[in-house]
Amino acid sequence: MREKELEKLIKSGESETVEFKESFSEGVIISLVAFANKSGGSVLIGVDDKGIVSGINTDKESTQRWLNEIKTKTSPSLFPDIEEIQINEKKIFYFKIDEFPIKPVSYQGRYYKRVKNSNHQMNLGEISDMYLKTFNSSWDYYVDEEHTLDDISFEKIEKIMTALKERSMDIKETPIEFLKKLDLIKDGKPTKGCYLLFLKDFSILTTIELGRFQTETVIKDSHRLQGDVLSEVEGVMDFIKKHINKRIEFDGSIQNIEIWDYPLDAIRELVLNMVIHRDYTSSYDSVVKVFDNRIDFFNPGGFPEGLTAEKLLNNDYSSMPRNKKIADIVKRIGWIEKYGAGIRRVNEAFEKAGLQIPEYKSIPGGVLVRVFAKKAETPKETPKETPKKTPKENITTSNLENRILAAIINDKFITALKISEKLNISVYTVREYIEKLKKKNILRHVGPTKSGYWEIIVKKGSDK
């Protein structure tokens, strides 16, 4: 690396791919491990955390000692590139490591990953997920050493095979051959996914606790499911339908129309997501709580790395099923159309029903999804904070548009999600009305999508 390039790198400061150290220490090796477990990075020795070049004194053997220490204290062993560079007659060392192909890499039995400009020690779940992603696999792909084929129900396997034949799939194999073809049996043993899909009796691994709550602490009814994951989907749906309301509407046709408190297809999609994305290695159970006006779904296992609730709402994510084998079977039998589209369909179904879009939260131990039965509130009268005059002459705006404009006037950096929370309306509705304001040439967004701001356009010569 040239001196000018290095000076520019130092000036930019520490980041997700750059770390400064005044001397060689275990912190250097930990940073190299964290970079190797992410997307690679550089460590500069002889630079303090404020970017001031202090330099470092070394002897002829220093570089070799460092390399040996890095090699012996990391597993798999790391071999970074090291370059000595002079800046203003001060000697610094530039360590560079690429993303390691087989992850995770450890330092003396501890695993680290880079998060923004610091190193974080990984927990067991993160270590396991990183290992499985390296081999493009998932937990349910591996052999279940605790169970045998005697623990599997062949009746359930044949039921799935029949369902696939009804979908015009040509299946001529025996149940065993069928499982082998789908990699659900390896070396004569069931995989973990095979056991969860077709277990004969019951298992605490699949426990789902169901409750009908009168208040936050008073339980009117409860039930526990511990069967195979496919039958549990129906079990959860039966319990929910037992404890929510439905009404009959007449539209003049021969058939009556049943209207439930919630769109059942969307609820079923959420239950399927619980099964597919659950962390079955966690000590937590899945929990479904039915209240008078809402349902809470808790599922062990957090969001995949990089996924947030806001990205779910914005449909800004790609499918990453935690249990690929279970997801594959669910897709084959037609319970899901394609990976990654489920949450979008859920949100659209709730909005179409006039209900609030579900809340998605990452909480200790897993993910909480909360759905509401209460109808979305009709927008109230324009609040006092509404602009005194319409932003552009000769153009009328609705009450809801004025409320959105008022929120923007109060905070020009506000997001559509924050506006939806403030006004108690869906984020999709907010975006729809923002587009209307843009088309009326009343509102525009300045700068990048994530870091820009809103600007209300005022016609030249009009009052501000």
Image: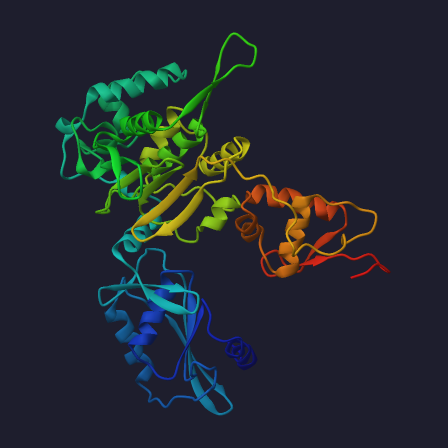
- Residue 206 placement (x, y as % from top left): 23, 36
Looking at this view, is 344 or 293 the one in front?
293
* Residue 171 visible in the current orientation: no
Looking at this view, is 204 or 152 the one in front?
204
Say which residue appears at 77% left-offset and 50% top-offset: 441
Say which residue appears at 35% left-offset and 47% top-offset: 367
- How is the structure coloured here? rainbow
* Residue 379 visible in the current orientation: yes
- As drawn, the residue found furthest toward the bottom would be 89
Would you place residue 143 above or below residue 71 in this image?
Answer: above
Asked if residue 461 lies left or right of residue 238, the reply is right
- Residue 381 placement (x, y as % from top left): 64, 45
Say which residue appears at 60% left-offset and 42% top-offset: 379
Rendered-image quadrant of the C terminus: bottom right
Image quadrant in which you'd find residue 273: top left
Would you place residue 48 above or below residue 171 in this image?
Answer: below
- Residue 409 placement (x, y as % from top left): 66, 59
Say which residue appears at 29% left-offset and 72% top-offset: 70
Image quadrant in which you'd find residue 29: bottom left
- Residue 219 placement (x, y as % from top left): 25, 37
Image quadrant in which you'd find residue 19: bottom left
